[in-house]
Image: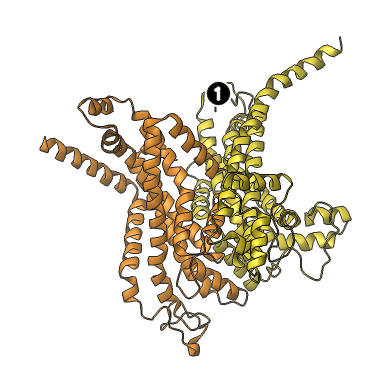
Chain colours: A yellow, B orange
Amino acid sequence: MAAAPLALPRLGFLRRGRPILMRIAQAIPVVVGVVIISFVLTRALPGDPAVYFAGPTADEKSIAEVRAKLGLDKPLPTQFAIYAQDLLKGDLGTSLTTGQPVMEDLARRLPASLELTLAALLLSCAIAVPLGVLAATRPGSWVDHLCRVLVTAGVSMPTFFTGILLIYIFYYLLGWAPSPLGRLDFIYFEPSRVTGFFLVDAVLAGDWETFFAALRQLALPACTLALFTLAPIARMTRAAMLSALSSDFVRTARAAGLTKRKVVYGYALKNALLPVVTTLGMVFSFTLGANVLVEKVFAWPGIGSYAVEALVASDYAAVQGFVLAMALLFVALNLVIDLLYAAIDPRIGFKAR
Amino acid sequence: MSTAAAKSGQTAFGHILYVLKDNPVTLIAFFMFAVLIAMAVVGPSLVPYDPLASEAAVALQPPSWAHWFGTDSLGRDVFSRVIVATRLDLTISVAAVALSFVAGSVLGGLAGYYGGWLDAGLSRILDTIMAFPLFVLAMGIVAALGNSVENIIYATAIINLPFYARLVRAEVNTRREAGFALAAKLSGNRDLSVLALHIFPNALPPMMVQVSLNLGWAILNAAGLSFIGLGVRPPTAEWGIMVAEGANFIVSGEWWLALFPGLFLVIAVFTFNLLGDGLRDIVDPRRRT
């Protein structure tokens, strides 16, 4: 008797588990393609890659050694197999500038970038979604116009320019923000590393002074990135809300005499959020790119500024490792968003795509 | 025949006028676009100072009558540099967009018309390009090809390619079996000429909208790449690199170094975005949001 209600959801999970596995399987060719492109990029280096990887002080003999070590004397398919094998082992080569394996460098710096990106996305969602809803429910009002202005400005403003303007206003003129140099002022100690997110680590350590110092440091770069991501989210929320509000089920809900609040937030918003979640995937792509610029402006020690330093120093293994890591991160995020989409909306099947 | 053509031309023109009258913002965008083009064409011969000539005596001066946008750390006139930079910035973005327009049209057209393995292969490649965060991919391409202005153009073209190729593919694919295409083929045209002369022109209106929206993005992208030190080399006047140079002085209060090139960048992108929205209203009023 007691087993029956338990068995039903389990069966339901099995039925929905298959398409989820299918979707995960669909990501595999994309990952293979990404690896192939990044392999082509490493081998497309101008001149002889062995010369670059051997470093500027290398002589003939050590270049030949590096060539043999990298397998550059072998045919291309074999080279690709070696490259893929190294990747599976988590080996992205060694950075010329830091002398460390690229993988370790990236892993050490990733939390800084993720903390910035996530803070910015949370902030922009918290502003953009209500803004889009208000603009859609009151077309022609000042909220609608504000939404339009913010959306247009957000699309036209280069992130690095927004960041510099914010530094000028809030650091130089008003003096509210700390100097735009990294994640934490040098008078504070870094919280002991648990997650690598300074805000979380400081809370875990119970060190509220460090928490607020890190928060002050994070505020400007996060706002810069948030202003940039605000535009597409607000635009999509507004458009999705407008089409949801003009649909039949909202009319029915209104005719049934439900309160305006219930209709807007309970029915329209719930359905409008689906395309917004889809847009988040696109927004993430832009954010990962914009991250590089914002990190350079604020001297943020994440993987973006790592890649910029590597680019300037012609440290190609580090740059290609960064590009590959970003692409894999993005593929994984898209996968999660698609799965999330199916979880929110049971009508979505993966076979139709 | 000629009167009918003239009449339809008249109504199309009348439609454009009607839309423009209804939407003065688009008219302003066209005007700003003309100003930008004029700046790129005649700007370098009109500016008051040599954009590369440094004069240590007047270094880091705020805006004045002699130097409208002030001077930089080497005493170069910021106004002259900003105006001169227009040509380079527009050239990079126009060249990149033109490249991806042509390549995207050819690849998308062939894939949409012939289908089969060509279509499947192209779709896979485009999907893979789109799987990268695009700005990051551009960084990787420039790093791989070498640090030069041409490679910035190629990188920007490659990351824009999927948008054009997919658009053309979809437009061509839906018209492949259309009556006019079959009729053109029956009257003896070869496949390629049916595709290029009869089907492809139908894809042009949505392509124009895409071009305009894309130009703004291409400028942002190129400026971003040169902001992080790729492509354009320091003495050259370019908006992205000027903002990067100005960023070093913003913390000590010399705001004019970064503000003016950044402002022109914003204006250019803004113009192309408005233009794209306006063109979309003219081409397809239903897609207006």
Direction top: furthest residue: A1
> What kind of residue is marked 1?
Phe
Say whether residue B283 is left or right of residue A67: left
Question: Relative to B94, is B169 above or below?
Answer: above
Q: Between residues B246 and A154, which one lies in front from this camera angle? A: B246
Task: Give the residue at mark 1.
Answer: A249
Residue B8 shows up from this direction: yes
Q: Position of residue B218 (x, y in %)?
A: 45, 55
Q: Between residues B183 and B273, which one lies in front from this camera angle? A: B183
Q: Residue at x 51, y 50 (%)?
A: A151
Direction left: furthest residue: B2
At numbered mark 1, what does the secondary structure look like: helix, strand or loop? Answer: helix
Question: Relative to B21, is A158 above or below?
Answer: below
Residue A134 shows up from this direction: no
Direction bottom: furthest residue: B57
Displayed quadrant of residue B283: top left
Chain containing the residue with disc 1: A
Q: Position of residue A85 (x, y in %)?
A: 69, 45
Displayed quadrant of residue B165: top left
